[in-house]
Image (cartoon, rainbow, N blue to C red):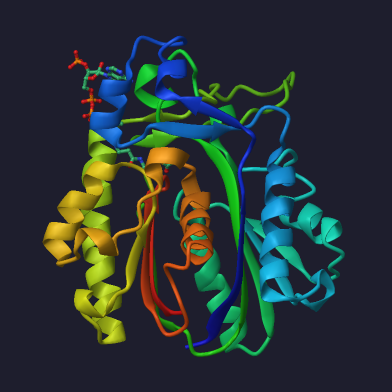
Amino acid sequence: MSFQIVGTGRSTPALVLTNDMISQIVDTDDEWITSRTGIKSRFISTDETVEDLATEATKRALESAGIDGHEIDLIICSSFHGEYLSPSLSCLIQRNIGASCPAFDINAACTGFVYGLDVADAYFSSGKAETILVIAAEVMTRHIDWSDRSTCVLFGDGAGAVVLKKGKGLKSIKITAKGDDNLLTIGSVFCESPFAKQPKIDPNFRMQGSEVFKFAVTSIIKDVKSVMKEAGITASDVKMLVPHQANSRFFQIVMDKLGFKEDQVALGIDHYGNTSSASIPLMLDELMEEGKLSSGDIIVLTAFGGGLTSGACVIEI
Ligand code: ACO
């Protein structure tokens, strides 16, 4: 299929918030958070904006690919939203890196990075692009209710980016959606209007955790099986499974059902928490930096989240 990953980059805020620090804010403790989620700490943005994080991750990805901003043909950015609804985050990144190509944002919640890769695949396949930047940048900690212990312990902030070039690395990809405004929501904030009669929607992140947990496990198993089958591989061919980092308890279930060994599953939730769509590219860059992936390795990416959405793909590095 259509592309090769030629560069990766990431950026996280300076502040590290530990579980003990959160237990000063809400009634929780390190033991509960660690045993139920696998999270020990997360990066929290203070003065860093989502644009700052996205731009820094992008500049690092460009540096690792050895190319300049003006060589990019398309910028796709996944985010719940940037500082502005308009201009889009991708347009601000375009300006900040000196690019002049088209740029747009997508929102598929935590699955946004895999959705971005799928859109990139279509652009490469149609011959419309030779080099594409896919970024995922999230400041989830600005969307949560810091008095709700069931959600505020879960999230962290960060951004990850990849530079893609036309190539044969992508072996298979699949994305799904199943509309639902019950299990996981973040309401939009609108201006006051003398005419508006619509009910106000809660702008805080709300989730029915155990239902989303079931959706996540089912989706990962179904999607990963499907993309591995299409690519003609089994778990033993895979160097690393890189799942969306939402709860480390998923990984044990998934490993057993899909036949992956512990050292094949990338685990960063302990220090990132759930960074929504940024979690996969954050992990990818970390794995590359640590020398855990090299040319010819097969990776499987899998994500799920609000929407409800899910997606997976098989890529040869
Ligand atoms: N500290 C201490 N106790 C807590 C906390 C906390 N932080 N949070 C909840 N509890 C309590 C609850 O009040 C409840 O107490 P009770 O039994 O007395 O009522 C008990 O712990 C169990 O609560 P549950 O919600 O049932 O806990 P569960 O084991 O399901 O874990 C969790 C919750 C971690 C949220 C889990 O359901 C989960 O990971 N779900 C999936 C989340 C996910 O994957 N999201 C991905 C999408 S995110 C996106 O798209 C942006």
Q: Measured from the top left, where is residue 92 in percent x and y?
A: 80, 52
The residue at 43%/72% (across/down) is 293
- Depth check, front residue: 162 or 297: 297
Residue 274 appearing in the image: no
Q: Residue at x 73, y 45 (%)?
A: 51
Q: Quadrant of ligand 1?
A: top left
**Relative depth, front residue between 61 and 154:** 61
Relative to 257, residue 2 above or below: below
Residue 310: quarter of image: bottom left
Would residue 141 be seen by someone viewing this image from the given angle?
yes
Q: 59 and 148: which one is in front?
A: 59
Residue 10 vs 227, above or below: the answer is: above
Q: On the image, which quarter does residue 78 sit in?
A: bottom right
Q: How many marks?
A: 0
Residue lying furthest front:
291
- Residue located at (38% from left, 63% from top): 311
Residue 230, image x, y percentages: 29, 83
Instruction: Please state if 98 lies on the left or on the right of 37 as rendered.
Output: right
Task: Give the x, y percent position of residue 242.
Answer: 37, 61
